[in-house]
Image (tube, rainbow, N blue to C red):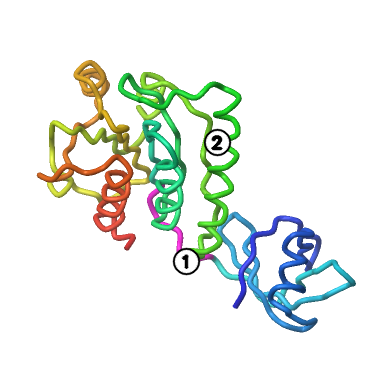
Amino acid sequence: MPRFFCINKENDKFYLDKEDSKHIIKSLRMKEGDNITICDKNGYDYECELIIDSENVQGKIISKKENDTEPNVKITLYQALPKSDKFETIVQKAVELGIYEIVPIMTNRCISRPDKKSMKKKIERYNKIAFEAAKQSGRGIIPRVREMIGFKEAVKEIKDYDMKILFYENGGESLKDFKYENLNDIAFIVGSEGGFDALEAGYAKENDITLMGLGKRILRCETAPIAALSALMLLTDNM
């Protein structure tokens, strides 16, 4: 059944925007009375019957249920900004796997250092990718890609998470050696092409962030966060 995100709801109807209305009528060639699934972005799915008025589409609610794809642990990725379009790939795959939120960060070894204007455009692009990935993968929410922050700000921000990890290219603890029961949230930090320098690793450790490795093989910066997230989803019983 075709699936759409929509928050424009009044009483027992959703009012889809022009873009989705056009897609339903012109591309999918759906007709009045056909059924679609509408997600309210807050974790609920609605089965709706189409009402088509010229070029405007409404969905009359038939039933409502809680979306069952959302992980029971909120996992946030703090990703050092890599070169070229690697961040786009990270966003897409992380959303598919169940990430809650993504925060780009600037570290000492980041090669890509966009100015504020270009970064604003990138954030808009990243959020569009997150939206499409959430739609494609049947998510109950649309994970947000936030504004970029510095490394020290990221370290301070995650101090209250139940589990705090920095994946360090020089190794550290192993994911399999920890217990994952009764966790509400996890934050993990992944480096860019150059990884982290010793000062950053030391600062993270001083602030009670666990340094961990991702195995004996060297992973590309766009592979590391996806490998880490996949492992965390499995270990928290969300795969």
Q: Name the residue that disc number 2 marks.
A: 122
Relative to 217, is 221 on the left or the right? right
Q: In this view, does 10 lie above or below 88?
A: below
Front residue of 125 and 201: 125
> Element under label 1?
loop
| Residue reaching furthest to the right | 54
Q: Name the residue that disc number 1 marks.
A: 68
> Where in the figure is residue 166, as x and y percent of width and height?
26, 33
> Where in the figure is residue 196, as x and y percent of width and height?
25, 25
- The residue mark sitting in front, 1 or 2, is 2
Q: Distance between the residues labelled 1 and 2?
A: 31 Å
Name the image quarter holding the N terminus: bottom right
Q: In this view, does 20 lie above or below 185?
A: below
> Secondary structure of the magenta portion, mostly?
loop
Relative to 101, is 125 on the left or the right? right
Q: State the image quarter where residue 11 is shown.
A: bottom right
| Residue reaching furthest to the top | 199
> Where in the figure is residue 148, as x and y percent of width and height?
49, 28
- The local crowd at label 2, few if under 14, some if 14 to 19, many if 20 or more residues have their Cα within 10 Å, is some
Name the image quarter holding the C terminus: bottom left
Disc 2 residue type?
Answer: Lys
Q: State the image quarter where residue 210 is shown.
A: top left
Which span of residues is magenta-colored? Answer: 67-74
| Residue reaching furthest to the left | 216
Q: Is residue 222 magenta?
A: no
Relative to 8, is 65 on the left or the right? left
Front residue of 57 and 176: 57
Q: Which residue is drawn at 82% across and 75% down?
A: 51
> Element under label 2?
helix
> Where in the figure is residue 157, as x and y percent of width and height?
41, 26
Q: Is residue 1 above or below residue 130?
A: below
Q: Residue at x 52, y 57 (%)?
A: 134
